[in-house]
Image (cartoon, rainbow, N blue to C red):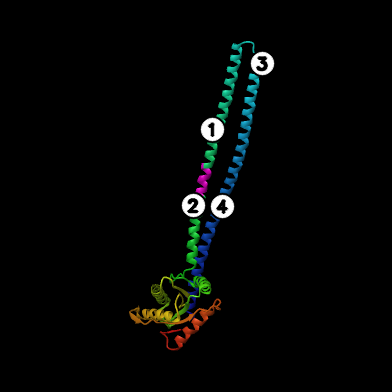
Amino acid sequence: LTAEQLPQVIERVGGLIVQRIQGLERTREELQQMLDQMVAQLEMLSRYVAGHDLEEDERKASNDTLNTQISGEMHALGSAVDSGNDLATLRKHLRTRMDSIGRHLQDFKGRELERSRQTRERTDQMRGRMEELEKEARKLHASLADEKRLSLLDALTRIPNRLAYEQRLEDELDRFRRFGQPICLATCDIDHFKRVNDSYGHRAGDKVLQVVAECFAASVRSTDFVARYGGEEFVFVLPGSTLEDAQALMNRIREKVAEVGFHFRGTPVSVTVSGGITALRAEDVSGDAFDRADKAMYQAKDAGRNRVVA
């Protein structure tokens, strides 16, 4: 970088860092709110369980009271029968005890109805709160999913970034070792990109990166993968492709890029790309295939650029 370019680049990098920090802070705040809500819901659940235990104790006490009352009435009724001298007196005692038993049963029924009402109210309240918690959990899950998705996208070109590429390559390596299907890796670099930045400015360079990325993304199959590796370099993961297949595809993509009509300040500018391709090997570990593809790409540049070497 020249002394004139350095402050602008530092400012742009700083802006990206600030945006990332702000995004992480928003996620942290959402997580904190979610945790606070979960704690509140757990406390409410604890109170609900405690209330349920208390209700069981009250119900047992109510049953015991009813049993005591009924036993007392039956005992009194028995005594009246034993001591009764005539049928009228016995009938009177029986009516009195039956009325008393009816009142005890009515009181018991009233207590049970009130307890059932309180239980329904507490259960409905708990259900409402749990539904709120579930709704917040779904919202947070969606927010975290968006955050994860954005963390795997390149901010400028809106295609996957290097982190996404590394994750995808690990997955493809695992599948390759299990099933043995051919898979190729290709790197691609915009030729003389620094010249575009120096001649027309970084905004023009950004536009070139965006258009080239769109061209790449539109040219690969749905099973293929393309990411911005860094700077003006891109990387392709091509499952099910032999070296010949991959070379044919990358040459078609190279030709499409060369056909794009770039103009800056009214001046037509030729933009081309150079690529390197390699087939994955069972013994490859992280970085091996990329290094081979990168080496092939530099051979393409040394051979005159705007070409692909496998």
Residue at mark 1 to residue at mark 2: CA–CA distance: 33 Å
The amino acid pointed to by label 3 is Asp
Q: Residue 300 appears at what percent x and percent y? A: 45, 86
Badge 3 density bin: few <14, some 14–19, many ≥20, Cα 10 Å? few
What kind of element bears circle 4?
helix
Residue at x 65% of width, y 23% of height: 72
Callout 1 touching callout 4 (CB < 8 Å): no
Mark 4 = which residue?
36
Dividing the picture into quadrants, the one containing residue 238 is bottom left
Q: Label 1 vs label 4: CA separation?
A: 35 Å
**Label 3, label 4: how far apart the Cα atoms are:** 68 Å
Judging by the rendered image, the residue that carries numbered circle 3 is 82
Label placed on residue 135: 2
Q: Earlier in the sequence, mark 1 or mark 4?
A: 4
Mark 4 nearby-residue class (10 Å; few <14, some 14–19, many ≥20):
few
Residue 8 place in picture, x, y as percent: 47, 75
User: Does residue 48 sit above or below 169 in this rendering?
Assistant: above
Q: Is residue 77 left or right of residue 246?
A: right
> In this view of the protein, can residue 6 be seen by the observer?
yes
Mark 2 or mark 3, which is nearer the start of the sequence?
3
Q: CA distance from mark 3 to mark 2?
A: 68 Å
Identified by mark 1, the residue type is: Leu
**Vertical arrangement, residue 88 with respect to residue 3, above or below:** above
Amino acid type of disc 2? Lys
Predominant SS of the magenta segment: helix
Relative image position of residue 144 (x, y in whole percent): 50, 60
Over which residues does the magenta segment extend? 124-132
Q: Secondary structure at mark 3?
A: helix
| Callout in the foreground (3, 1) | 3
